[in-house]
Image (spheres, grey):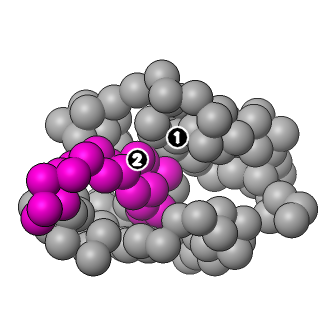
Amino acid sequence: MSSPTGLSAEGVDALQRLKERREVNTVILRRAESVGLVLDLEGNLTRDELLQALPPDKARLGVHELAFASRAGTRRHAHLLILWVPESARGQEETYTAGYTGLKEFLTDVHVHLTATRTDQLEYRRLVALTG
């Protein structure tokens, strides 16, 4: 499948590393004028570090691998696609929607898609519950 329109080559590469390498579990993308979505951050972040990396006044798109234990006690991992739009970034939501839609189609192995406006919407137990 081809990459979504407007996703930079470095963004595509970062998403590929997220799939292939254990040391990368988070990719955050930002919108850049005339370029589209570009890499803002790539790393191995805990959920708390992810929350700190999301700006309080700017929208972002993020893909994060959540590690958790199932009810049976087995270790599981699930990728989450997050559209981050805090209250102070409300006017930016429209510019990120096309990228969000494109990433949903591009990242076929990501089954949890969510929009968050507050950090409590990214609370660990809630994210685990969303994985089904």
19, 5: nearer the viewer:
19
Around disc 1, counting alpha carbons within 10 Å, would you say few (fewer than 14), some (14 to 19), or many (20 or more)?
many
**Magenta region: which residues?**
63-82
The kind of secondary structure element at disc 1 is: strand
Predominant SS of the magenta segment: strand
**Residue tagged by mark 1?**
27
Position of residue 6 measured from the top left corner of the image (x, y, whole percent):
81, 58
Q: Nearer the viewer, residue 106 or 84?
A: 106
**Can residue 129 be seen in this snapshot?**
yes
Give how far across and how far down residue 20 sits, in percent. 63, 35
Rendered position, 121 above or below 31: below
Give the residue displayed 75% in from the left and 36% down from the top: 13
Q: Are marks 2 and 1 in contact (CB under 8 Å)?
A: no
Q: Can you tell which mark lies on residue 44?
A: none
Q: Position of residue 15 (x, y in %)?
A: 65, 43
Residue 129 appears in which quarter of the rendering?
bottom left
First in sequence, mark 2 or 1: give its number. Answer: 1
* Tag 2: amino acid: Glu
